[in-house]
Image (spheres, coloured by chain):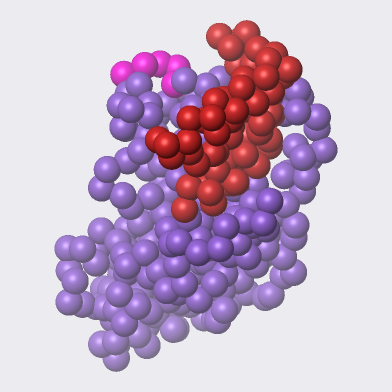
Amino acid sequence: MSEKVRAKVKDLLDSGRIKGFLGLRQADGHLGPHLFTDGRELDALAVGDLKRPGDTRYPLNKQLLTLMRCDPDDSFGVLVRGCDERGLKTLITWNQVDPAKVVAVGIACPPELAAACECLKPYPDEFVDGGKVEGSTFASVATVDALDLHSRLTHWLHEFSKCVKCYGCRDICPMCFCKECSLEQEDLIHTGDLPPENPIFHLTRAVHMAGRCIDCGLCNEACPADIPLRTLYKKVAEIIAQEFDYRPGYVEPGEKPPLNILGEAPEH
Amino acid sequence: MTTKRVAVMKELLSFTGIEPDRLRLEWVSAAEGPKFAQAISEFTSRIKTLGPSRLKVAA
Ligand code: SF4
Ligand code: SF4
């Protein structure tokens, strides 16, 4: 699906609208992030369909942040799926990205990916390629909700006990941009201990992602222990949506998350 | 702010299988001794009814 994306990026680069485009590039059989600065090198531009459609994703927004911090005066383009666009909007809300300096080039996700992600909106507001697929509900959350309290605890304690505390979930997260991380605060987490205190480590991260996680699922993909982190954060998102009618990435950029402002308390 | 956070926390606890009643938020000023005593006795009796947490038992 990269032809239309290439054409769009070529326009942006050739016209000088952007200094570089952050996308994916195929090299030696692998896909990885790459900053394209020359319209002539776009043959190598990929959108992440290595073996299956959309099987390779990267937290490009995270690299964008680094890039913009190093080079705050220039404008950059970035490849976005639905989740990345939610991320971009959220980073704007948190004053991490200057919207005037970013041009998003959107692609809509294929049905397989959208279904696997249980994505509510598997397409950005505007996209140059791909087709609109209906969003799905959070079946994985419903499965845990259906358990009784006792089985839920058994389930999560088992899952969390697999954690090797590599911090991979945090490191890959495009919404983790804090200079000081809660997961390294001695008062909350014993930083030297292995395994991490169960379930404190994971609940700390879950609470910290409330109003911020845009449900990209990269943490879940990165976790070497296969902990269903996405299900946990999907639930957090559901709680925030129910209590405060707020969903990060689905609200207009600039609309502050409920746990960061005063305002109406939940009714019960 | 805290009211909001505690509400979220209670739901998250319930999702992970921990009785939300183990968390309670109450505002008591230094001048409200009886209110404090009452809140604490209510809380302790609630916790006693719930019994030891499985987290404690597991540890
Ligand atoms: S799904 Fe995971 S990686 Fe993505 S924003 Fe949420 S916490 Fe971060
Ligand atoms: S990525 Fe997985 S193993 Fe690593 S710290 Fe996060 S939850 Fe634990």
Magenta stretch prevailing secondary structure: loop
Chain drawn in purple: A
Report whether residue A84 is seen.
no
In the figure, A255 relative to A173: above or below? below
Judging depth in this view, the residue of A146 and A168 nearest the camera is: A146
Q: Is residue A1 magenta?
A: no
Check the image and report above or below for A180 versus A133: above
Q: How far across and down, in percent of the image, does residue A196 sit? A: 44, 21
Q: Is residue A80 above or below residue A238?
A: below
* Residue B8 shows in this picture: yes
| Residue A241: % across, % down | 63, 59
User: In the picture, residue A225 is in which quadrant?
Assistant: top right
Q: Quadrant of residue A247?
A: bottom right
What is the total number of numbered labels drawn onto the structure image?
Answer: 0
The quarter of the rendered structure image containing the N terminus of chain A is bottom right
User: What are the residue bounds of the magenta stretch?
Assistant: A192-196
Residue A228: percent from the left, percent from the top?
62, 36
Tell me the quarter of the picture where residue B45 sits: top right
Name the residue located 68 percent from the left edge and 51 percent from the top edge: A268
Is A195 within the magenta? yes
| Residue closest to the eye, A149 or A107 | A149
Give x and y (percent) for residue A64: 32, 63
Residue at 74 percent of width and 69 percent of height = A134
Q: Nearer the viewer, residue A240 or A167?
A: A240
The residue lying at 57 percent from left, 69 percent from top is A250
Q: Is residue B36 left or right of residue A238?
A: left
Q: Residue at x 40, y 16 (%)?
A: A194
- Picture colour for chain B: red
- In this picture, residue B37 sits left or right of residue A153: left
Please identify the residue farthest to the bottom as the structure is shown: A15
